Image: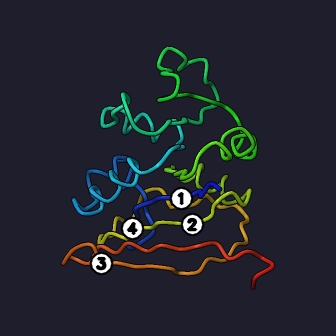
Amino acid sequence: MSKVILVAATSIDNKITCGSNGDSFSWTSPEDQKYFTQLIKDSDLVIMGRKTYQINSSKMDLTRGPLRLVLTKNPKKYSHLNIPGHLEFTSLTPPEISSKYFSKYNQILILGGSQIYSLFLKDNLIDEIYLTIEPVIFGNGKNLLNRLKIDQSFRLVDFKQLNRHGTLLLKYQVIQKNSL
C-alpha cells in the first residue's frame, strides 16, 4: 500500500520561500538538505509543480532514483524534457494522478509548491506531513498552503531537532475522520 507524504521546509512564520526566491536550498540547513536528499532516494515517486521543478532541476540526478512527475497546465511545452521512467510532465489532477500512479508505488512524496500542497490536501490524498521548521523569519514569501477550505486533522508521530540552531523536523500522520 502506498504512503503519500507532503514534504516541506518552512520558516518560523510559515514561509516556503524567502521573498520571491523559491530556492529553499539557499536557506535550509545542511542537516535538512541531507535528510531531504535521502528521503528522495528512498522514494518511488516524487510529485512537484512546474515552478518547483524549474527552481530545482539543476540539482536533480535524472539518471536514477524515483520517477519525478511535474504538474503543469501545458505538458506539451515540456515534452522535449521527458525522460520516461525518470521525468514526466502532466496536467492530470491530483485524483487522476492518484488513480493512475498511487497503486504502483510504495512511497510517494509531494514536494510543492503551495498550490500543489493545497490541491493534494484538499482532495484528501495526503497520509503524512514531514515538516521542517527552520529558525528564521522572512516576513514575506509564499505560505505553505493557499487559502483553500481544508478540514483535516493530523497527529504528531515523531519530532527531532536536526541541529544546535533549532531546526525541527516534525512528522504528522493524518487522522481519518472515522477514527476521531
Alpha carbon distance from label 2 to label 3:
19 Å
Q: Which residue is mark 1?
A: 6
Q: Amino acid at mark 3?
A: Gln
* Element carrying mark 4: strand
Pick whichever of labels 1 and 2 is earlier in the sequence: 1
Quadrant for the C terminus, please: bottom right
**What colouring does the structure picture have?**
rainbow
The residue positioned 39% from the left and 67% from the top of the image is 132
**Furthest-right residue in view?**
178
Displayed quadrant of residue 76: top right
- Label 1 vs 4, first from the N-terminus: 1
For marks 4 and 3, the one nearer the N-term is: 4
Give the Cα separation between the discs numbered 1 and 2.
6 Å
Which circle marks residue 161 in the picture? 3
> Foreground residue, 133 or 141?
133
View extreme (bottom): residue: 180
CA separation in Å, label 1 and label 3: 19 Å
Residues under numbered marks 1 and 4 in contact, where contact means CB atoms less than 8 Å apart: no
Give how far apart the Cα atoms at labels 4 and 2 are: 13 Å
CA distance for labels 4 and 3: 10 Å
Q: Quarter-wise, where is residue 97 in the image?
A: top right
Q: Residue furthest left?
A: 164
Q: Earlier in the sequence, mark 2 or mark 3?
A: 2
- Going by the numbered disc 2, the residue's amino acid type is Glu
